[in-house]
Amino acid sequence: MKVSREQMAENRQRIITEAARLFREQGVDAVSVAQVMKAAGLTHGGFYGHFKSKADLVCQAVEQMVAHEEPLPSFAAFAESYLSADHWDNAGEGCPTAALSLEFRHQSPEARCALTKAIEAQLARIAQTLGKEAGQNLSGEELRRQAIGKWSAMVGALIMARAVSDTELSEEILTSTREFLMNADD
């Protein structure tokens, strides 16, 4: 039975969506193509009709994870949401940088490039938000420096909070980092 172009596009999108979720939850290396296809409700054999390789899928999944990001309402609101128990507890729907960075040094150059673009885009969003909040008081270079420092603290805190086995310590890491970031300019 022949599949329509529309159905092919829907299937491809479902594969990418499920791969993005599974990669963030379990890590790229821990997820097989067969697992992605099963999660998408498709057979393993159809994978290569959509992608050249798993590395190609990884790139497409990372690009999708950040494709529709909206401008930040404020840095404080972003930090509050990012460093929340909900984000900590839902890696499959959360930040690809925190979920994937540690293992991406072992991924293909194409996959690393996709994550690099995602990180650059996020840094630009944060710098733009910080610039709006600071008015004309900071140079572009200073805004980028602050964006890198603040987001690095947030990503690191989320990674640490997810890594420890003590829920109270996880909450303390997230809360302390939020408080630190809100008082960093004082």
Image (cartoon, rainbow, N blue to C red):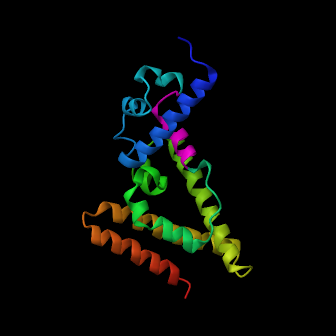
| 63 versus 185 height, above or below | above
Q: Which residues are magenta?
A: 51-65
Residue displayed at 55% across by 39% down: 60
- Compared to 22, does 47 lie above or below? above
* Residue 182 among magenta residues: no
The residue positioned 40% from the left and 78% from the top of the image is: 176
Q: What's the residue at 34%, 75% (across, down)? A: 172
Q: Is residue 124 left or right of residue 107?
A: right
Query: Which is more toward the observer, 8 or 140?
Result: 8
Among the 4 quarters of the image, the one containing residue 6: top right
Q: Percent from the top left, x then y, of residue 78?
A: 55, 68
Q: Position of residue 102 (x, y in %)?
A: 40, 54
Prevalent SS, magenta region:
helix
**Residue lying furthest bottom:** 186
User: In x, y percent, where is residue 142?
Assistant: 64, 75
Report whether 1 appears left or right of 67: left
Camera sees residue 106:
no
Judged from this view, the residue extending furthest toward the left is: 165
Check if residue 61 falls in the magenta segment.
Answer: yes
Instruction: Name the residue furthest top.
Output: 1
Q: Using the rendered image of the protein, determine whether residue 58 is visible from the camera's viewpoint.
A: yes
Compared to residue 128, the image places residue 17 above or below, namely above
The outermost residue toward the right is 136
User: Quarter-wise, where is residue 28 in the image?
Assistant: top left
Residue 87: image x %, image y %?
43, 60
Left of 58 or right of it: where is 125? right
